[in-house]
Image (cartoon, rainbow, N blue to C red):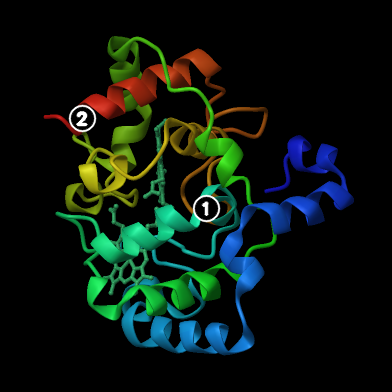
Amino acid sequence: MFTHKYIACGLAAMAWLAFGGAALAETATPMMLKKGKELFAENCAVCHQADAIGVPGLAPSLTNQELLSISSDKFLMSTIRDGREDTGMMPFAHLGRKNVRAIVAYLRSHARLPNQAEEVDSQSDARGDPRFGEQWYEYICSTCHGLAGDGYEAGGTGTAIGLPGFLDKVSDGFIRETIKKGRSNTRMLAFQGPDGLANLSDQEIDDIIVYMRGLAKN
Ligand code: HEC
Ligand code: HEC
């Protein structure tokens, strides 16, 4: 999804940011990409599908443009290494760091938007009222992500956004951007702006994030 923000950046800035942000996209050699593609096919495609496009209710898309643009290498690598407890995403520490790097480089080779992870992760922490957040969460988000945020287990198509496996690895900025912009070509729609499913205010989004952070503690 090309929002006004990206267009305002201009093409030159986009090219610059693409190099500034995504370390692995920058340093990947053709051999590393080939290796990453093979490892992906062997270990990941069974759930995430060929080309990593995902399947609703089974595994999310890993070539989704919004995901790639807000993800740091650290987020992707540590998620692959540790998996997400109590979900279908198992740990792959046994592959070793070098192989996990090759997989991330392969995923990054699908990125078409500049990497904004640094900016997104340095956003301020959410401040708000979890009681309002709870109302929005239950009204809108729980349909797909489950009331407790346990994801596919609850029968929906959204991932386990209330579990530590996700929450411990993401910044509030990551969650905020995902809610605002959604993820194109998946069921995660944008919740801000004229094209959004709902037009939540910045404060309402922060209320939801504060509520979600509390879910992990229950
Ligand atoms: C048995 C199925 C399965 C396999 C095999 C699998 N995954 Fe996953 N993966 C999942 C599920 C399910 C999730 C979402 C978990 C949740 O609900 O939070 C996920 C989530 C992820 C995420 C987080 C995506 C996001 O939107 O935040 C990444 C990154 C990821 N997987 C990478 C990989 C890689 C790389 C491999 C191979 C080395 C792999 N996965 C293998 C099922 C799988
Ligand atoms: C119609 C279903 C649906 C609704 C409603 C929905 N989501 Fe999602 N959400 C998804 C799906 C599906 C994904 C993963 C995208 C994919 O499958 O590739 C996702 C991903 C996310 C992620 C990223 C999680 C990760 O594993 O990286 C966050 C954060 C999120 N949603 C928050 C919310 C919040 C907060 C709400 C309510 C305001 C909400 N979603 C409403 C379907 C939904």
- SS at circle 2: helix
Q: Give neighbour class at mark 2: few <14, some 14-19, many 20+ (Cα, 10 Å).
A: some
Which label belongs to residue 67? 1
Q: Name the residue under label 2.
A: 215
Q: Which residue lies furthest to the left in this view?
A: 218
Ligand 2 lies under 8 Å from the Cβ of mark 2:
no
Residue at image coords 62%, 72%: 27
* Rendering coords of residue 146 (x, y %): 24, 40
Give the residue at x 23% y 77%.
Answer: 94
Instruction: Tell me which residue sits at (37%, 29%) in the image.
Output: 140
In terms of depth relative to the viewer, which is nearer, 114 or 135? Answer: 114
Looking at the image, residue 199 sits to the left or right of residue 127; the answer is right
Residue 15 got which mark? none
Q: Quadrant of residue 181?
A: top right
Q: Position of residue 85 (x, y in %)?
A: 17, 55
In the rendered image, which quarter is residue 202 located in?
top right
> Camera-side residue: 167 or 95?
95
Circle 2/circle 1 CB separation < 8 Å: no
Q: What amino acid is at disc 1?
A: Leu
- 146 in relation to 39, above or below: above
Disc 2 marks a residue whose amino acid type is Leu
Q: How crowded is mark 1: few (under 14 residues within 10 Å), some or many (20 or more)?
A: many
Q: On screen, 23 above or below 20? A: below
**What is the secondary structure assignment of the residue under circle 1?**
helix
